[in-house]
Image: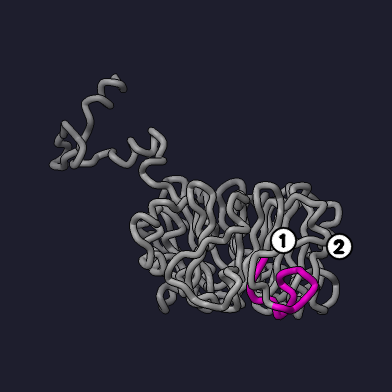
């Protein structure tokens, strides 16, 4: 995976890029980035809006700065808001946050900006967090035992507390998911979605565009099950700015919510208040992607084809369109506005490819082959050693 496809990484030298193991581009204009090296050092660079780089000052930097407090922490999950604020969890289950905090989205009980990474304590101290998710100004954390905690801006009920009062510290989201084991979480700008271990989907928060999939457009102050998905088992969920994607265990895609840019893939621009199935050449889908700061959708099929739809550099693509990419991450690097990352990206350099991946890369390559066959007027480039092994 080439991080150079994101414009901000062109600021780095080839030597610096070669050290990157994981990375995330964020910010309202994709002007900030954080990356982790192979020896688990953490660096940031960029514009530093709202102290979102966590460097202790409000200075922008084109030269990567090390975040000493996070080095060696083994970052597992990372998410960001629109302020922006940043929330991450480590392999040990700790949660750190910094950046914009006007609505207590850092979970430290104040509204003061976090200039450096601070561990989110209170209720999360006794929990091991395995995943975090951020909306525009609210945050979610999923514990290893399936509990969801929420904090921050709550004007539409996105914290799930039953009121619209902002939540200054992490609070367990209960109500109808009290006895459920949640396995995945996602956030739209002002909405929250959770998937439980039996494949049911629950949503809460803003629903003005139908992004909760409940068949109406009324906000929900506590979690509510998406009844229209009864009988299917959802394995993955992804939220855009105001739309939602769901992937079932049978590789079927459902979408609902805002559709101004065709981000649902229905062929039109009409909002959908309930889940609708999205057809993609009858191919089984294995991954879906969306980001709360964008109106773009992407999916990857079992055959390795990557599709995109929705907002594409200002244009509207109303049906899934096959790309030349090999991963959904590239869709957001090249087509999304802003060109952020929809997840913490793992970077695989050629030195770290498996044997299978290396062979696949050289398959039918004229540069490395030592034999070629002509079939129906076309050449197929092969390797004698591989053919010998297969025989």
Q: Which of 155/39 is in front?
A: 39
* Element at label 2: helix
Residue at 16% x, 31% y is 371
Which of labels 2 and 1 is toward the front?
A: 1
Of marks 2 and 1, which one's residue comes earlier in the chain? 1
Quickly name the residue at label 1.
119
Is residue 309 shown above or below 343? below
Q: Main secondary structure of the magenta part?
A: loop
Q: Relative to residue 3, is residue 232 drawn left or right?
A: right
Q: Which of 71/120 is in front?
A: 71
* Element at label 1: strand
Q: Quarter of the image holding residue 87?
A: bottom right
Relative image position of residue 86 (x, y in whole percent): 62, 67
Mark 2 closeness class: few <14, some 14–19, many ≥20 residues within 10 Å? few
Q: CA distance from mark 2 to mark 1?
A: 27 Å
Q: Which mark is residue 175?
A: 2
Q: Which mark is residue 265?
A: none
Relative image position of residue 67 (x, y in whole percent): 57, 61
Q: How many marks?
A: 2
Relative image position of residue 252 (x, y in whole percent): 56, 52
- Quadrant of the frame with the C terminus: top left
Residue at 46% x, 57% y is 328
Residue at 78% x, 73% y is 220
Q: Which of 6/60 is in front?
A: 60
Q: Is residue 317 visible?
A: no
Q: Is residue 303 magenta?
A: no
Q: Which of 171/285 is in front?
A: 171
Is residue 145 shown above or below 310? above
Q: Which residues are magenta?
A: 97-112
Q: Relative to residue 321, is residue 115 drawn left or right?
A: right
């Amino acid at each position: 995976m080439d991080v150079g496809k994101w414009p901000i990484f062109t600021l780095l030298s080839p030597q610096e890029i070669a050290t990157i193991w994981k990375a995330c581009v964020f910010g309202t204009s994709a002007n900030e980035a954080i990356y982790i090296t192979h020896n688990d050092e953490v660096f940031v660079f960029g514009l530093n809006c709202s102290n979102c780089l966590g460097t202790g000052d409000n200075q922008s930097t084109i030269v990567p700065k090390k975040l000493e407090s996070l080095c060696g922490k083994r970052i597992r999950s990372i998410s960001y808001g629109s302020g922006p604020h940043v929330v991450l969890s480590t392999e040990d289950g700790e949660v750190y946050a910094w950046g914009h905090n006007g609505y207590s989205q850092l979970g430290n009980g104040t509204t003061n900006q976090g200039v450096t990474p601070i561990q989110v304590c209170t209720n999360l101290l006794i929990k091991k967090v395995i995943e975090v998710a951020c909306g525009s100004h609210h945050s979610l954390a999923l514990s290893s035992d399936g509990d969801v905690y929420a904090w921050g801006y709550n004007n539409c009920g996105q914290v799930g507390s039953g009121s619209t009062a902002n939540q200054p510290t992490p609070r367990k989201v209960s109500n109808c998911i009290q006895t459920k084991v949640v396995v995945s979480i996602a956030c739209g700008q002002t909405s929250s979605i959770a998937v439980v271990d039996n494949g049911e989907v629950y949503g809460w928060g803003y629903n003005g565009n139908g992004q909760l999939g409940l068949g109406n457009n009324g906000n929900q102050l506590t979690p509510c099950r998406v009844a229209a998905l009864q009988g299917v088992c959802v394995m993955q969920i992804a939220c855009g700015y105001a739309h939602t994607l769901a992937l079932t265990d049978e590789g079927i895609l459902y979408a609902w919510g805002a559709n101004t840019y065709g981000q649902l893939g229905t062929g039109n621009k009409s909002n959908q208040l309930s889940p609708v199935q999205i057809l993609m050449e009858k191919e089984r889908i294995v991954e879906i992607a969306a980001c709360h700061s964008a109106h773009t959708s992407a999916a990857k099929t079992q055959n390795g084809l990557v599709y995109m739809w929705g907002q594409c550099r200002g244009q509207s693509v109303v049906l899934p369109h096959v790309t030349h990419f090999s991963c959904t991450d590239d869709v957001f690097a090249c087509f999304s506005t802003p060109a952020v990352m929809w997840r913490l990206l793992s970077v695989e350099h050629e030195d770290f490819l498996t044997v299978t991946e290396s062979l696949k890369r050289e398959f039918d390559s004229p540069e490395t082959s030592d034999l070629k066959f002509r079939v129906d007027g076309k050449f197929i480039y092969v390797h004698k050693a591989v053919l010998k092994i297969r025989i």
